[in-house]
Image: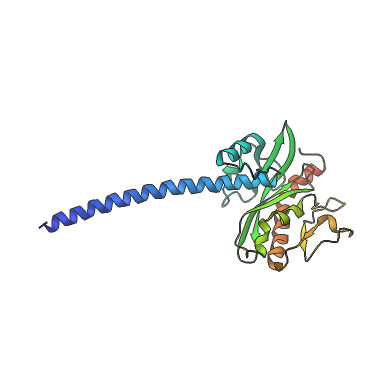
Amino acid sequence: MHSNRYTLLFTAIITIVLASLLSLADSSLKEKFERNVDVDIKKNILGSLGFKASDDSPWTNEDVESIFQNSIVGFVVDNSGFVVKDKLPEDIDPSIDLDLFPIYKRVSNNITEGYSIPISGKGLWGTMYGYFSIEADGATAKGITFYSHIETPGLGGEVDKPWFQNNFVGKRFVDENGELIGIQTVKGQVDETSKEAYHLVDGISGATMTSRGLNQFLLKDLKLYDPYFSKIRNGKNS
């Protein structure tokens, strides 16, 4: 029969070993999770800028990293629309750098083919996170994607479906005077013969609050970046 001392020592050793194994597993899973999140964000940036994987050959994580590295240039602008030298999007501390904003630019043969900016705001049930891309003219939507939301499936959750996102392509978020007005989702279908059709998109049936939230935070985020894109519209940036 073992003594109490032996039992306590055995229990302590087992506890230490198990704790070490759990800590190792947690660290490994955390690193894998963070990498998957990073890859998913990059995939959404690529998707907003027109890159699409084929159904027959879906992207691996390595594919996403390779395409991103070869085609996307990340940089930072301030609240006056000037590029901040020697600072990259990953250097931004959201709790401190409140007047600095990341932009991702699609480049091919030294030609700019579009820009992507992060967007986020309240839907019906919580915060929606995504990317909105802009054509090289600084005035026309190139695409939109969402990588995180908790909207109702079949209703507000349709924001991550191609049929809804494709509605934004080609829409303009400035008026004929170059003033920022945003892009608005409407109830039902857009009357394409109306004068306002250029900045309106078909809404999601039964998702009024989600649509209203998207309208508001998309305009809010576009305002943050408008000093930069207004320079592009006026031929002062590239």
Nearer to me, 79 or 16:
16
Which residue is outermost to the left?
Answer: 1
Q: What residue is at 18 percent from the left and 53 percent from the top?
A: 9
Picture mark count: 0
Indicate the position of residue 100 as horizontal and vertical percent values.
Answer: 64, 47
Which residue is outermost to the top?
Answer: 109
Q: Quadrant of the C terminus?
A: top right
Indicate the position of residue 86 as horizontal and vertical percent values.
Answer: 61, 36
Q: What residue is at 17 percent from the left and 56 percent from the top?
A: 7
Nearer to me, 238 or 85:
238
Give above or below for 25 relative to 88.
below
Give above or below for 185 relative to 42.
below
Q: What residue is at 79 percent from the left and 65 percent from the top?
A: 188
Nearer to me, 66 or 213:
66
In the picture, measured across the screen, residue 78 lies left or right of residue 40, that is: right
Q: How is the image coloured?
A: rainbow
Q: What residue is at 62 percent from the left and 41 percent from the top?
A: 57
Q: Quadrant of the N terminus?
A: bottom left
Residue 101, visible in the rendered structure: no
Indicate the position of residue 6 as horizontal and vertical percent values.
Answer: 14, 54
In the picture, measured across the screen, residue 158 lies left or right of residue 9, that is: right
Indicate the position of residue 43 as horizontal and vertical percent values.
Answer: 62, 45
Rendered image quadrant of residue 85:
top right
Residue 206, visible in the rendered structure: yes
In the picture, measured across the screen, residue 173 lies left or right of residue 97, that is: right
